[in-house]
Structures are given as C-alpha cells and as structure tokens.
Image: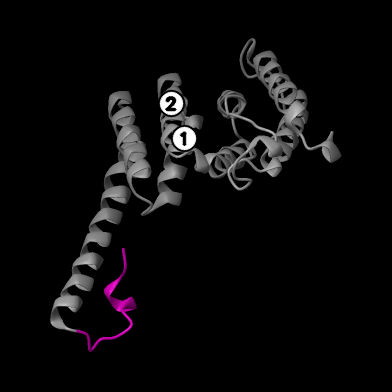
Amino acid sequence: LALYEDSPEKTLSPRLLLLWYFEEMLKDRYQSFVDRFLATTLKDSIESNKIFALRVTSALLISCVEGETQLLSLIVNKLGDPGKKIAAAAAHELRRVLDKHENMQIVIAREVQQLAHRPQLSQRALYNCIVYLNQLRLRREEETVDDLHHSPSLIVSLVNTYFRMFDVAMRASDEKTGMKSRLLSALLTGINRAHPYLPDKDQ
C-alpha cells in the first residue's frame, strides 16, 4: 500500500487521488490493528488470547507482504515466551508459514537466530529456538532449484550459531534440572544434522 503523500503528482484526477487517500487510510488502519491489537494481545496474560493472536498474525503473514518484518518478529519473539503452549504455538505458526511460502525459510531462520543470540535469553527460550532451527528442511546447493531459496550460507550460519550457542550453554549455569543437558543435546543434534549439507569448502 502507498501513502497519499508519496504520490508522484498532486495534479492527478480526483478519482486517482481518492484512491491514494483510501490506500493511506487502509494502511493506517492495518498498522493500527497490528500495533494495538496483535502486539498488545501477544503480551496478554491469557494463553488462549495469545494463541489466537498468533494465528491471526501468521494468517496475515501468509496472505500479504504488508508489514512482513513486524509480523514475523511478533511470531518469532513468542518462541521465547515462558509459557510452553505459547512457544509451541509460535513454532507451529512459523512452520505453517513455511508450508505456504518455502522461500521465506532463510528470512525466518535468521530471525530465529537473532533471537537465539539475544543477551540474557533464558535457556528454555534458547532451547525453543534451537529445536525450531533443527526442524528446517535442509538441502545441498546442487539439489536446489533456486539458490536463493536454499543458499549454503543458511547452512553455514546455522552451524556457526550452533557452535556459538554451545559455548554459551557450556558456560551457563543450569536454570532447571535437565534443561542444560537438553539444550546441549539439541545443539549437537543440529550440528550433526546440518554438517552433511555444508559446502565442501566449509566441511
């Protein structure tokens, strides 16, 4: 959607100017819905409300590109939600987006990696990120139809993330019984799973 103030000519026909104005109003209303309803509801204390907001957010992300970056960020951030159901719902919605738009895999993976590298992230939130990354569909470069969709750089970045987070996990204290070992196990799984897909020069 375009803003009225960005129109190239203010001397256009009244009909076209009206269309520009309508688009600007629609864009404002859409942004207000994302900011005032979705973003706010995802911070709600009621789990059912947050799950509903996640479903709406992913539906918007699937159906249109308007506000894609913000919508994706809203979903990915809920991987760090202290509630297990919310984190699981966020992972589910991200998979649903990928089912419809496979070419978003790199974008989603990088957003999840950014969350994983966030300072002071809890071990459980990091674990949720790693488990999600471990479920991505990986392919070697020569097996892809479009290098943009499954670039080897994704594999390299995943392996780098796993090793960095392994170091972080080893130095961290165990927040809960078993969580540290589960995290280390997930990281090793990720490394072993991604390693065969590395380009020969990075083996």
Q: Nearer the viewer, residue 135 or 57?
A: 135
| Quarter placement of the N terminus | bottom left
The residue at 84%/33% (across/down) is: 203
Residue 153 picture quarter: top right
> Please, what is the three-letter code of the amino acid marked with disc 2?
His
Q: Which residue is mark 1?
A: 98
What secondary structure is marked by label 1? Answer: helix
Q: Which residue is mark 2?
A: 92
**Foreground: disc 2 or disc 1:** 1
The secondary structure type at the circle numbered 2 is: helix
Query: In the displayed structure, would residue 157 be above or below residue 33?
Result: above
Furthest residue to the top?
177
Drawn side of residue 126 relative to residue 17, left or right:
right
Q: From the viewer's perspective, is residue 19 above or below residue 53?
A: below
CA separation, marks 2 and 1?
A: 10 Å
Mark 1 Cα shell of 10 Å, populated few (<14), some (14-19), many (≥20): some
The residue that appears at 55% across and 45% down in the rendered structure is 107
Q: Quadrant of residue 50?
A: top left
Residue for point 73% across, 31% down: 197
**Residue 18's spot in the image, x, y percent?**
16, 74
**Place of residue 75 in the rendered image (x, y in percent of width and height, measured from the top left):** 43, 37
Q: Residue at x 61, y 38 (%)?
A: 113
Task: Please say whether residue 185 is one of the residues in the magenta stretch.
Answer: no
Which region of the structure is painted magenta?
Answer: 1-12
Q: Is residue 7 magenta?
A: yes
